Amino acid sequence: MAYKTIYETFLDAVKKHPERTALMYKKDGPYQKITYRELNDSIEAIAAALGKLGVGRGDMVAIMSYNRPEWAITDLAVLKLGAIVVPIYYVPGHVLPAGNVKYILGDSKASVIFVENDDLLSVVEQIRSDLPSLRHTIIFDYTADTGVSILKFSDLKNDPERSAQKTDLSPDDIATIVYTSGTTGEPKGVVLTHANIISNAMIALKKFNFTPEDVLISYLPIGHMFERTCGYYTVLFAGGSIGYAQNLTTVAQDAEEIRPTIILAIPRVIEKAYNTAVNKIEGSSILKRGLVAAAIKNLNKRANLKYKGKSVPLGLKLKCAIYDKLVASKFKKLGGGRIRVIVAGSAPLNRQIAKILYVLGFNIVEGYGLTETAPIVACNLVEDNILGTVGKPFDGIEVKIGENEEILVKGPNVMKGYFNKPEETAKVIDRDGWFHTGDQGKFDEHGHLVITGRIKELIVTSGGKKIPPAPIEAKITFSPFVEQAVVCGDNKQFLVGLIVPSRDAIEQYAKENKIHYENYPKLLQDDEIKKVIKGEVESSISDLPSYEKIKAFVLLEQGFTVENSMLTATLKLKRNKIMEKYCSIFDLMYQDKSATQAPRNIVFL
């Protein structure tokens, strides 16, 4: 199939929908709108300004900012010139350490960097002397005179002298280098071409029936390919609208104003939203709690019968009609009441939550992909959705199961390789062009892909059992009392875990049950609290075989974060770092509990 470049494809949408709303952003109260024509005017202005600064085909331009119109304007301006975008992960409150920024800028030899604000400017200034290639820093929000020689985005956009030269580009030219925040080793720059991304976006556009009427709320970091391809390029190519959340804490209230029709979400976001709703219900009257429980039970019966192709009895139909009106309709008003599909990706989605949302009337589908595949490999569709799977491979993408059940991928979306790392590239792309994902999976009888684990994460017990930890962790974090969980047990006779409780839920429980405590660490040592969490954990894993059940866990006061290097920028666990930090605690959990005075925060099951 013949592809255009990303900017050319966007320009097609501009020509078709010049006065439609492309972007929405919060400013001084209500959301402000930017039309496709206005957006393209800004893109041309920034492209011209960058051209005057000497930026041209093949040059590296970094962007370190949260989602906002300036991100899209800069990105498309850079791509228009044939330069290469190097995104650097940032969301408010989660900044990559200066060392990571230094590595990315140094490895890519970026000549220009766009930063969102003064705080991010200070990060760049800390390392600037070590970056001889970096010539210009451009800031979106300039609030203080730091004495640093920088350029203001607003000045560049308003420069009346615009003379950007036309650049002849090929879809096979490099569009972006995205540095993975891998769970082991130094970051690797994933080299993606215009064709890699366009091929993926155009299939997504078709599969999910994107139209100019669609609206998406953008809150997942735009530097990651899930949001960038599916929540940015695809929406604009379709002539739809993107509304930017102010930050991760305001997504719910922003959605009420933006009223999205499509939501992209990572499982943890879905789980937290679900638990928040449950907590509200459990804090309401007994009558309301009973009504919701009965609704879910009966709506689930109806869903199971429909799934099996069986008729729904009249009595159940009448009950469900009532529950649809009294309960499901209330849930569907969440997020502005127009959500037609929720697409989950990045990690395994708890099947129980997915089923509950499904029976309440939400079209929730799960997909699978990687940065290296731009990113989508497979995805369920609204009309062909099997919970517990990640759907069928996208058109034109081949998937097969290789040795050790590894998922192998070939197609127009597969990266060119890792930047400046030919040996690393050769390890994952074989001579026949198959990309080795490192993930394990299988196909079900319907041809849907099922992810069973990740090879590097696989736990092999001393008894020879091979256990993927992620599904067990997902079951445990289904509890509203558990924020994070890590399961381990490599070369051991049984599994143990690290549990990060949900502090809000724990403190609320203590308040309601009149449990007095000096501070939060002391609260986690309270016998009643440990009993509650123990019950939650045991209940969540009750249906697992014995060898997949944890036999002990420790309660941690502090969670795993990007800042403490326990999470990647995409919020995946850095298991090697976690094992290294908590190795002594793991050893204590493997001692005979009757023969040792275990610390107060260890719980044996």
Image: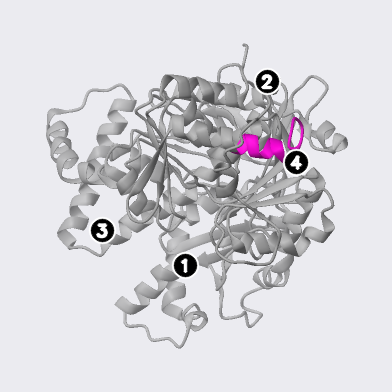
Q: How far apart are marks 1 and 3 (CA)?
A: 23 Å
The residue wearing badge 3 is 281
**Which picture quadrant has residue 52?**
top right
Going from the N terminus, do you reach mark 3 or mark 4 first? Answer: 4
Name the mark on residue 171: 2
Q: How far apart are marks 1 and 4 (CA)?
A: 42 Å
Queried whether the magenta region covers residue 57, the answer comes back as yes
Task: Give amino acid for label 4.
Answer: Gly
Residue 472 image position (x, y, % from top left)? 54, 51
Residue 270 image position (x, y, % from top left)? 42, 48
Q: Distance between the residues labelled 1 and 2?
A: 55 Å
Crowdedness near tag 2: few (<14), some (14–19) or many (≥20) residues, C-alpha within 10 Å: some
144 vs 342, nearest the viewer: 144
Number of numbered callouts drawn: 4
The residue wearing badge 4 is 189
Q: How is the image coloured?
A: one colour
Residue at x-position 53% and y-position 31% = 233
What secondary structure is found at the residue carrying circle 4? strand
Task: Give amino acid for label 2.
Answer: Pro
Task: Give amino acid for label 1.
Answer: Lys
Q: Give the range drawn in magenta.
A: 46-59
The residue wearing badge 1 is 534
What secondary structure is found at the residue carrying circle 3? helix
Going from the N terminus, do you reach mark 1 or mark 3 first? Answer: 3
* Mark 1 or 3, closer to the camera: 3
Going from the N terminus, do you reach mark 1 or mark 2 first? Answer: 2
